[in-house]
Amino acid sequence: MIQIKKVVLAYSGGLDTSVILKWLGDNYHCEVVTFTADIGQGEEVEPARAKALKLGIKSENIFIEDLREEFIRDFVFPMFRANTIYEGEYLLGTSIARPLIAKRLVEIAKSVGADAIAHGATGKGNDQVRFELGAYALNPDIKVIAPWREWDLNSREKLLAYAESAGIMIDKKPNKSPYSMDANLLHISYEGQILEDPNVEPEEDMWRWSVSPLNAPDKPESISIEFENGDGVGINGVKLNPARFWEKLNELGGKHGIGRLDLVENRYVGMKSRGCYETPGGTIYLKAHRAIESLCLDREEAHLKDSIMPKYAELIYNGYWFSPEREALQALIDKTQQKVSGVVRLKLYKGNVIVIGRESKNSLFNAAYSTFEEDSVYNQKDAAGFIKLNALRFIIAGKANRDK
């Protein structure tokens, strides 16, 4: 076991991290600092302070921070400039939050003179990779403690027994979900229990953020989203800061049953995993972002950007946010967004996001060229030469094969 003097723990105040907090002291005999991040999970984070104090953590060693603004501004917006989707469906709600938490863990460790960080991710999941790759990228000398890879408390029953023996009070919430859940401003995910059978339909009362599309309002709602340089800045004519912008999108999407997803994904560690996700704001946002890009991006620029998106999504999913290759792709993506500004109008209706209009001062759409009516700027005879030149290789190959 490595020698640790002080460790910063990513602490939620729940069962797992409360047990970890006590376990670190019992096994590493080190000073523990707790860090609790508010990234829009929708639950009060201040109770974590009281829990940490009860477990013997000094008040000056308890960090609770509101990171919602930074999360959307510096992580979600840059990611969605690429219209990022993993494996055709997943909007990376969990993946994109981990580098921000890793960043603050490392920064706090430096500020308090800690030589290690600790997290509660299991040895089966992707999050252990994301936390640790991020930490090592930012501080190659940092030490990482991952209790789930060390202890034998590998069931909820064992965790509860350890908590009871250590005098750790665990809140028993009357309406607590039986699922393993992760939430932030971008999404909420559900795993475990009946979802471990990929052929079982999720229970309707599992969903927290959205009504069923079947029960959504019978009347569509029209909204508009304003973009500046590829990022959303306003809804329905009102400018909003990044966090409030996303909260508003989530409210609108949830009201209309938008953004539910049932997915079997390929985990980085090698196994398949079934999860259910609610990403109401993200689903609306991606539809709107592609609509404004359709006006403002040159064809080859847009196609190049689309071609690198799967690689970019894979880098984020696999924990390489701070890698030089992700940063290089980001620079290319951001270059394409310099003129992506304007307004997109949409209708939200029973799980659907329908684009009904878009406009931009930087629009490349030119009706004089694209009209189906008579025009004076496009010579249709030019198309014959274009087709002949592009078909030349097929003609040559066809003649060669015919003569054999």
Image (tube, grey):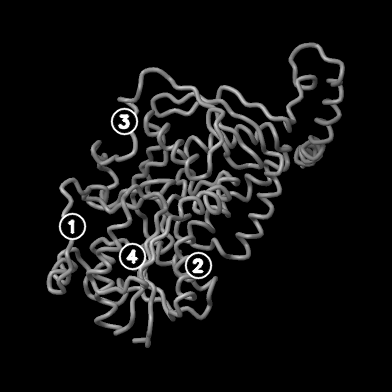
* Secondary element at image label 2: helix
Label 3 sits on residue = 212
Q: Which mark is residue 11?
A: 4
In space, the residues marked 2 and 3 are separated at their CA atoms by: 37 Å
Q: Amino acid at mark 3?
A: Ser
Mark 1 nearby-residue class (10 Å; few <14, some 14–19, many ≥20): few
Q: Which residue is mark 2?
A: 134
Using the rendered view, name the quadrant where residue 231 is placed.
Answer: top right
Give coordinates of residue 85: x percent, y percent: 51, 46
For the residues labelled 1 and 4, the Cα–Cα distance comes to 15 Å
Circles 1 and 2, Cβ within 8 Å, touching? The answer is no
Describe the element under mark 1 as helix, strand or loop: loop
Q: Which of the two residues, 307 or 329, is positioned nearer the viewer here?
A: 329
Q: Quadrant of the C terminus?
A: top right
Q: Which of the 4 image quarters holds residue 124?
A: bottom left
- Image: 174 above or below 31: above
Identify the residue at horizontal 53%, vertical 78% (top origin): 140
Q: Earlier in the sequence, mark 1 or mark 2?
A: 2
The residue mark sitting in front, 2 or 4, is: 4
| Mark found first going from the N terminus, 3 or 4 | 4
Residue 182: x %, y % from top left:
34, 52
Residue at x-position 70% and y-position 45%: 336
For marks 1 and 2, give the CA distance: 31 Å
Q: Residues within 10 Å of mark 3 (few under 14, many from 20)?
A: some
